[in-house]
């Protein structure tokens, strides 16, 4: 099938995906739509929970495997939407709808890419296409849960909106639950150990503390207090104040190292929810990156998290759309971004496969 026809079908699939609810961990119906894509092109596929995947026709044992991956789950629409989030509409070149930009445009573009190369012989890489679930919630049945059931992956393209520039590194994530203690008491009596006032020192530390190692690509480790909670009655000083701290980790530290430093230096107890979402990267010298540079694409470091965090191989984040539109009200992607994305994906693989 021609590139133009695949592009047309990819945009039609995206409209179907938008009109089908697929909140994270509730992607049964969109998984079926993706199955139908494989069926339409007579491509054998597998499904585990709501993850759907397939291999190129000329899969040869021993060849390195290139993973093509993006996700079909979405966040829930926020209250600022003024359009129907499940009604795909093209207005002034913009395709509106929940999940259009994050990451439906990337997913359908990668499906078109995989289908374009599916029948080709003598590729340098085996191709593995995975449409994954539960990316937004980092759930157990996301790519991280699927990986043990897949063969060894040597390199990956992860479809997330990057304006088709090359995100050669991605920050990791650790969410900490911090507790600041004090002495509970009646509000009417003196108390110089109020847990809420004690929080000031911790807030200043999380705001001002700098980690020594700065990445050339990803910059500094960034700590942000995103939630604070204390007290249930107006006349009772609470014994504890709780903070949630979002820490974005550069490629100069492992998540464990960041935890060890916070544990040793923070003026409060801070417990990580998980240490598995480490930073990821691909060497600039890798042929995949060099192929993208040869096509005029820029390289940069991404501050946002994706399914790259589940991978233990070099991985490149690359896809149509703009990350700043993700999770926004009245989400959209330009139709020509999808057309350009599929074209660049195909030309990129031409240089390496």
Image (tube, rainbow, N blue to C red):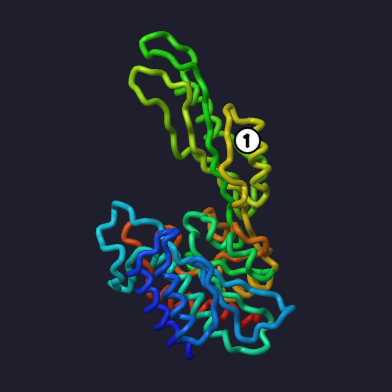
Q: In which quadrant of the rendered image does the C terminus lie?
A: bottom right
Q: Position of residue 42 (x, y in %)?
A: 50, 87
Residue in the foreground of this view, choosing between 83 and 46: 46
Quadrant for residue 323, please give it: bottom left
Whether residue 181 is situated above or below residue 1 in the rendered picture: above
Q: What is the crowding at mark 1: few (fewer than 14 residues within 10 Å), some, or many (at least 20)?
A: some
Helix or strand or loop: what does disc 1 sit on? helix
Disc tally is: 1
The residue that appears at 45% across and 11% down in the rendered structure is 191
Q: In the displayed structure, does residue 133 sit left or right of residue 312? A: left
Q: Is residue 324 visible?
A: yes
Q: Position of residue 326 (x, y in %)?
A: 41, 59
Residue in the foreground of this view, choosing between 31 and 70: 31
The residue that appears at 47% across and 57% down in the rendered structure is 136
Q: In the displayed structure, does residue 289 sit left or right of residue 114? A: right
Q: Position of residue 47 (x, y in %)?
A: 52, 72
The residue that appears at 54% across and 43% down in the rendered structure is 175
Q: Which residue is mark 1?
A: 262
Whether residue 73 is situated above or below residue 252 in the rendered picture: below
Q: In the displayed structure, does residue 156 sit left or right of residue 86? A: right
Whether residue 290 is situated above or below residue 202 in the rendered picture: below
The residue that appears at 52% across and 77% down in the rendered structure is 344
Quadrant for residue 291, please give it: bottom right
Q: Is residue 162 visible?
A: no
Quadrant for residue 222, please give it: top right
Q: Position of residue 227 (x, y in %)?
A: 44, 37
Query: Furthest residue to the right?
Result: 62
């Amino acid at each position: 099938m021609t590139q133009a026809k695949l592009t047309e079908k990819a945009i039609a699939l995206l409209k179907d995906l938008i009109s089908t609810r697929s909140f994270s961990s509730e992607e049964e119906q969109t998984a079926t739509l993706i199955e139908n894509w494989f069926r339409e092109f007579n491509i054998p596929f597998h499904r585990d929970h709501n993850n759907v995947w397939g291999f190129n026709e000329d899969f040869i044992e021993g060849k390195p495997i290139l993973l093509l991956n993006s996700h079909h789950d979405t966040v829930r629409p926020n209250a600022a939407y003024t359009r129907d989030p499940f009604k795909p509409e093209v207005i002034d070149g913009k395709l509106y709808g929940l999940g259009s930009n994050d990451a439906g445009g990337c997913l359908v573009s990668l499906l078109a890419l995989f289908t374009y190369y599916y029948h080709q012989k003598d590729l340098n890489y085996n191709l593995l296409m995975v449409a994954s679930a539960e990316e937004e919630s980092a759930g157990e049945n996301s790519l991280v849960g699927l990986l043990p059931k897949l063969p060894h992956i040597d390199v990956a393209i992860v479809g997330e909106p990057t304006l088709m520039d090359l995100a050669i590194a991605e920050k990791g994530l650790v969410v900490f639950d911090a507790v600041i203690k004090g002495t509970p008491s009646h509000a009417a009596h003196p108390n110089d150990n109020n847990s809420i006032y004690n929080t000031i020192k911790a807030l200043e530390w999380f705001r001002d503390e700098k980690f020594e190692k700065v990445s050339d690509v990803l910059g500094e480790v960034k700590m942000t207090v995103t939630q604070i909670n204390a007290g249930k009655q107006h006349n009772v000083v609470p014994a504890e104040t709780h903070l949630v701290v979002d820490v974005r980790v550069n490629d100069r530290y492992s998540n464990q190292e960041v935890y060890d430093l916070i544990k040793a230096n923070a003026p409060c107890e801070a417990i990580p929810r998980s240490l598995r979402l480490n930073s990821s990267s691909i060497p600039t010298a890798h042929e995949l990156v060099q192929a993208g540079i040869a096509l005029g694409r820029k390289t940069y470091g991404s501050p946002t998290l994706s399914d790259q965090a589940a991978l233990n191989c070099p991985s490149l984040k690359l896809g149509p759309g703009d990350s700043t539109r993700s999770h926004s009200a009245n989400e959209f992607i330009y139709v020509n971004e999808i057309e350009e994305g599929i074209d660049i994906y195909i030309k990129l693989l031409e240089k390496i496969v």
